[in-house]
Amino acid sequence: MQLQQLAYFVAVADTRHFTQAAETLGVAQPSLSKQIRALETELGAALFSRARGNITLTPAGEALLPLAKRILADADTARLEVQELAGLRRGRVRLGATPSLCAGLLADVLRRFHDAYPGIGLVVEEGGSHDLVRDLSRGLLDLALVILPLAGDAPLATTAILRERLVVASPAGGTGQARPPRRPYVRIEDLRNRPLVMFRSGYDLREATINACRQAGFEPRFAVEGGEMDAVLRFVEAGLGIAVVPSMVLAGRPRLRGTPLAVDDTAGRSRDHPPGPSGLLRTVALAHRKDVAPTHAARAFQATLEAFLVEATRTGGLPAGVESLVRP
């Protein structure tokens, strides 16, 4: 089995067309077909069904595809790492991040890293935590900023870096259904019968909100669903409904207000800690695969991120509702 054969296989799997795959790779179509046949002979199973001119993956092909993509990604990472060790001032960091971080403090961290390492390429993938964990496990990312706890049993190492407050976003001065209760916080129960603007599948906030509502004994009602972070916030601004979001995404959006989302804490009953509402928080961690050591560029990015959080904590530069977990 050769890397070239796997690359040919992935190209055909992505295009579902041998001629288009050959053109994309810049090789002759007969040569590509020959290598695919050699790979199938090596594995002892057909990878594509060619019935009636339609190219589809066989069960063996479906099983091989994610593994082939991961092998090719690891080989590319190894190539870049050796180039770094050979003294070339270049490399790459493929970083995944949740939309709240992309819309918040990540830009400042990326700018600091780029200034310090101008030869290192930056590739940023924005997505929900579940999607990022999947891509990281497949070798498509070097690092990812994800929400703890991780879903499933992905073999990832994590370092908690910050904690952010969840709020209910509503139009500033909104009326009717979009207006939250007149208190300094909102309970999950207050979302009953209120129209919600909901993220697409794959966002941890979607699952967290739905599960919290069900635990409170009701099914949430959606006004709109399926959006990314920017779309969700814009829909809330337009008065379509309210949404549960991290507080940091409301910075620079004067048309929105955020009311802390809280749960009743009935555990504390001492004089110093009376029972009452406590804010809902979530923890963000930097993750990488356990079976592959981070590249020099990835380690440099982690050091830059942690130094930024330490400095921002000292100078008061973190967004409202965000607490760094990185200690000096």
Image: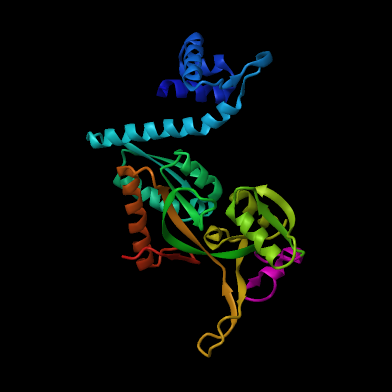
Q: Is residue 75 above or below residue 309?
A: above
In the drawing, does residue 71 fall left or right of residue 245?
A: left
In the drawing, does residue 217 fall left or right of residue 27?
A: right
In percent of the image, x 38 and y 66: which residue is there? 313
Q: Which residues are magenta?
A: 171-192
Residue reaching furthest to the bottom: 271
Q: Is residue 243 visible?
A: no
Depth order, front residue of 154/254: 154
Q: Is residue 312 above or below residue 64?
A: below
User: Which quadrant would the N terminus be assigned to in this image?
Assistant: top left
Residue 151, position as x, y percentages in the image: 54, 53
- Residue 3, by quadrant, is top left
Residue 300, position as x, y percentages in the image: 31, 48
- The mark total stands at 0
Depth order, front residue of 289/164: 289
Q: Indicate whether residue 183 is drawn in magenta.
A: yes
In percent of the image, x 56 and y 86: which residue is there? 269
Q: Is residue 310 visible?
A: yes
In percent of the image, x 63 and y 16: which residue is there? 50
Residue 218, position as x, y percentages in the image: 75, 64
Depth order, front residue of 285/151: 151
Residue 73, position as x, y percentages in the image: 42, 33
